[in-house]
Amino acid sequence: MDRHAKTLATVALASLLAIACGARPASEPHALDAPAAVPPDGPVTFTRHVAPIVFEHCAPCHRPGGSGPFTLLSYDDVARRARQIAEVTTSRFMPPWLPETGFGEFVGERRLTETQIATLAAWVESDAAEGDAANLPEPPAATDGWALGEPDLTVTLPAPYTLPADGPDVFRNLVMPLPVDETRWVQTVELRPGNPRFVHHAIMAVDDTTSSRRREEEETEQPGEPGFSGMEMGLAFMPDGHLMGWTPGMAPNPGIDGLAWRLDPGTDFVLQLHMLPSGRAETIAPVAGFHFADTPPSGPPLYLIRLDADHLLDIPPGDPAFVVEDAVELPIDVEIHAVYPHAHYLAKSMEGRAILPDGTERWLIRIDDWDFNWQDVYRMREPYLLPAGTTLSMRFTYDNSADNPRNPSDPPRRVRAGNRSSDEMAHLQLQVRPRRAADLVLLRESLYRHAIRRNPANPWSYYELGNALLEQDRLDEAASQYLAGLGADPTHVPSRTSLGAVRERQGRIDEAAAEFRTVVELDPGYADGHYNLGSVHLARGRLEDAARHLRETVALEPDHAAAHTNLGHALRELGRLDEAATHHREALRLRPGSAEAHNNLGSVLAVGGLLDEAIDQFQRALRIDPGHAQARQNLELAREIAAELERAGLR
Ligand code: HEC
């Protein structure tokens, strides 16, 4: 079932990762409001009053190598732009930060207080004096190093990527093999995107198949350039429940203790960069620093809840306030860790709310002036409990009028959901952690029931609901969901595969075989399709058919350990012992620590009369798993036979 789950994760990810590209709209004019707070008494000077604000709140980006278009590190730097600085801080255009104050508290908030804003304005009004050099605070240290300390593993591209001088925004997926030779647990990844002036945001994903490498090889648009283009990342996905993004000036994410994610050997790191051509060709050389945890995750895992109103998006041209909403009730207690709102250029305001069972309302996030270019993942400063019975809701408003300076279409046109920058999206993702791991399946069940109500035409929702029911051993209900998925799309291979698996568990073997046969007809290149059909034939004693489909499986996927095992069983039953041993040896090569694989090989060797070698395999099995009853029984039997043969003088 793992593989089907992966396919789905990929699909869910494709929408998670669907981010538009397009021209950057001009920033809006900034009105200079009257300062609301009182600046300090007496003369306001750079060294005493302004530098502390600018060094802390502006220099993280306005420094060499930062994302800002100029440095703000000296009196001259700041005095030269004094009036503009007063304007952009008063309008709250700088520092860039979308969430409204008082509607959720997040890590790394970039906000000036009213007093700080008033201080900057008063300084500009009073001739922007420098003041006594003795008062100047230490300028911020150069931050070329890693914010989270030296990583355990750094990866980079063999050669940098060259961003073209002009043209539209670029979405590039860069593939970097991860040199780990044993399973590791990743606490967090710190990204240095290489050139933050031109990288607007980044998404980090992993691919444990070869699909990303293959796409890179196939990409011929820009031969020799690393990576492949586009927003769609194929089989690369973020580790379950994790949100791995990068934006300029974001607070480094130390990860959550006890919730590291699993990294297996052979996995590629896939980095999607959204870049803005600058008029000159630019060299982009990202470096990713991996921090490993000592221990695997423990306790309940993270999970992403997605509120989604894409299906309601049909925004008439000229409409200045088109509203969409979605809401879902939590069936279990969860702790909320982060929110990730997503839309394209037309979105104006975004509201995320929780109504607790006692009726109190709690804001998850509120953004009154959304700007695609400053999108971010917002992590809660303190994760908090949302009890079962809480209603989570989103309400997004879109401005499709000609007065919206960010409107990518001129004149405005009808807009629906989609992946292009001129399409729209309406997602609010919530990163949560169930209080009890066993509850997660109930949350999934309820979210997919909701997804089906939202869009009854999507076979994936029935499939996922079926999986959640199957995990609860509700076989009949699961089967009816898979059937409903096939009602929506009769060619939906995952639903048909899972229906076959349920039929097998229900003992309805012939029906299972019929479903698996249809799968193989629908997708003859699907290795697991042949594996399922071969295995069910094996269970029915149809050995030749079993061997045929299992051979097909290992031809399509030579490292399919389970197929080698079952093929070994089928060949043994057919009396083809040498071939059987070969496939059990393959299975063993692929799963060197498996007691089962040693026992399987031993059994074939014993049947073939190779008693010493068989005994050796049973002993190995028992060293790995001393409680392996079958291996113990087999060992005793093999020893008895050996002794008997010896007594008879046959050994
Ligand atoms: C998170 C990074 C970041 C921080 C923090 C930041 N800036 Fe900026 N700033 C930028 C970027 C990037 C631009 C380029 C314009 C854009 O992309 O919107 C910019 C542009 C500007 C501009 C030019 C605006 C225009 O309309 O052309 C000014 C002035 C400015 N910043 C001042 C400040 C001041 C003052 C602070 C601190 C109070 C600050 N910035 C904090 C990233 C930052």
Image (cartoon, rainbow, N blue to C red):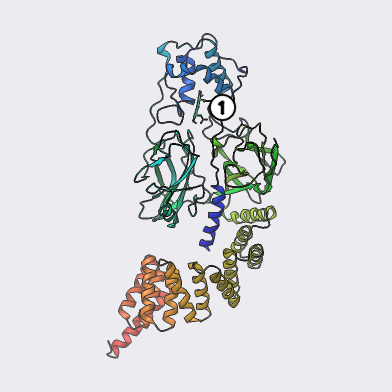
Residue occupying the far right of the picture: 359
For the residue marked with disc 1, what is the amino acid? Phe
Question: Is residue 493 shown above or below 434?
Answer: below
Q: Position of residue 510 (x, y in %)?
A: 59, 78
Task: Label 1, secondary structure: give it.
Answer: loop
Q: Position of residue 254 (x, y in %)?
A: 46, 40
Image quadrant in which you'd find residue 498: bottom right
Residue 628 seen in this snapshot = no
Quadrant placement of the C terminus: bottom left
- 121 relative to 179 in the view: left or right: right
Q: In this view of the protein, which residue sits in the foreground, 316 or 361?
A: 316
- 461 relative to 547 in the view: left or right: right
Question: Is residue 317 shown above or below 12?
Answer: above
Residue occupying the far front of the picture: 411
Question: Is residue 370 shown above or below 156?
Answer: above
The residue that appears at 56% across and 29% down in the rendered structure is 27
Residue marked by disc 1 = 93
- 331 relative to 601 in the view: left or right: right
Q: Position of residue 292 (x, y in %)?
A: 40, 47
Q: In this view of the protein, which residue sits in the foreground, 365 or 176?
A: 176
Count how many numbered circles sit on residues in the image: 1
Q: Is mark 1 within 8 Å of ligand 1?
A: yes
